[in-house]
């Protein structure tokens, strides 16, 4: 036990020494710069006969962390960070989402190539002054022609300059092409849900159920369609069926991750004070 403790102290000392040497080589210790804004890239693969979509979201990880620190302060009475008296805001023009958000593809050798032809902006926040708090999230959605997608495995990311800040998103690897009718119809449902087109889900959901009735997905999407139509009783029944399908025993898959979104929907509908629930 003593030897392990000595070894641990030795490792910590070596890392500390390396850190001091690297940062003192210029004559002073440098501080890590925390960027005020961050960017998240989310890719939604569409069916072969449709389009895929990219969501680019801008938020402040720094303010989120400060909120957590303030919550810790509220529990133990000791502040872990200096509380901000102001909020972040930036002047952003609507045209920024179209002209200033750049997309890049990384090839197998890590070389980046600018993507210009296959991404079309379809929705974005209004221009003007955008205020950022710990919970703020502003996002734009871009449509992608599937026949113009980079090949499988190529990673894409987004970049934008706001003021003096260059913000770079996470990377997303392009997925494999879809195989078969079932995968395509499920991706179509996923796209319509992502775009908020719940009124288009019913025929797609019924098609999924007819092709793959043992899957919970068709019942999930049909439940969303009925909830959108305010048929809450039928929606609840379908969500409960989806949950049973999700947990259906299998020799190949004994343990399941909790379907949190599905469970949340069931809980919401059971606790909602609206017809037909008293």
Image (spheres, rainbow, N blue to C red):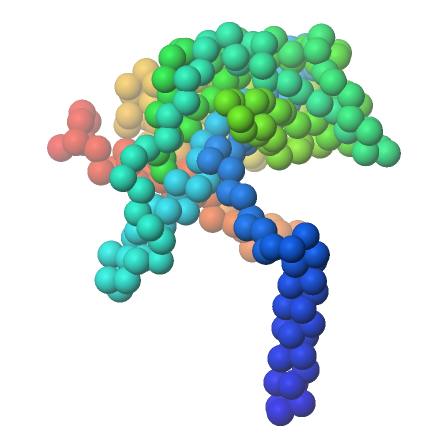
Relative depth, front residue between 198 and 52: 52
The structure residue drawn at horizontal position 56% and vertical position 10%, both measured from the top left corner, is: 98
* Quadrant including the C terminus: top left
x then y, percent, for residue 179: 74, 25
Q: Residue furthest right?
A: 109
Choose between 75 and 30: the one closer to the eye. Answer: 30
Q: Measured along the vertical axis of the image, is residue 108 above or below residue 16?
A: above
Residue shown at 58% from the left, 51% from the top: 30
The number of numbered discs placed on residues in the rendered structure image is 0
Residue 89: quarter of image = top left
Q: Position of residue 211 (x, y in %)?
A: 61, 24
Q: Position of residue 143 (x, y in %)?
A: 60, 12
Image-quadrant location for residue 157: top right
| 224 w.r.t. 66: above or below | above
Q: Residue furthest bottom?
A: 2
Q: Quadrant of the N terminus?
A: bottom right
Near-viewer residue (273 or 144):
144
| Outermost residue toward the front in this view | 27
Residue at (69% x, 72% y) in the render: 14
Near-viewer residue (164 or 42): 164
Q: Confirm whether residue 97 shows in the render.
A: yes
Residue 77: image x %, image y %?
24, 62
Give me the residue at 53% from left, 26% from top. 164
Question: Relative to 44, is 132 on the left or the right?
Answer: left
Q: Is residue 213 visible?
A: no
86 left or right of 15 in image: left
Q: Which of the 4 quarters of the picture holds residue 84?
A: top left
């Amino acid at each position: 036990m003593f030897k392990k403790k000595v070894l641990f102290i030795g490792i910590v000392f070596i890392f500390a020494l390396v850190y001091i040497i690297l940062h003192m080589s210029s004559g002073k210790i440098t501080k890590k710069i925390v960027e005020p804004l961050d960017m998240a890239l989310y890719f939604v693969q569409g069916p072969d006969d449709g389009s895929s979509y990219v969501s680019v979201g801008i938020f402040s990880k720094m303010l989120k962390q400060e909120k957590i620190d303030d919550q810790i302060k509220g529990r133990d009475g000791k502040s872990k960070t200096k509380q901000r008296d102001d909020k972040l805001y930036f002047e952003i023009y609507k045209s920024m989402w179209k002209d200033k958000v750049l997309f890049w593809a990384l090839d197998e050798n890590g070389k980046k190539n600018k993507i210009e032809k296959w991404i079309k902006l379809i929705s974005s926040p209004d221009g003007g002054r955008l205020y950022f708090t710990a919970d703020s999230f502003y996002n734009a959605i871009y449509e992608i022609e599937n026949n113009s997608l980079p090949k499988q495995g190529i990673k894409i990311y987004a970049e934008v300059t706001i003021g003096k800040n260059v913000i770079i998103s996470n990377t997303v690897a392009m997925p494999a092409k879809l195989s078969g009718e079932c995968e395509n119809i499920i991706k179509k449902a996923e796209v319509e849900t992502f775009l908020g087109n719940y009124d288009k889900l019913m025929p797609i959901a019924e098609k999924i159920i007819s092709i793959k009735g043992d899957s919970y997905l068709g019942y999930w999407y049909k439940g969303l369609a009925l909830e959108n139509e305010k048929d809450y009783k039928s929606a609840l029944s379908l969500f409960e069926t989806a949950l049973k399908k999700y947990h259906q025993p299998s020799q190949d898959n004994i343990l399941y991750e909790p379907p949190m979104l599905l469970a949340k929907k069931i809980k919401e509908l059971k606790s909602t004070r609206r017809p037909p629930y008293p």
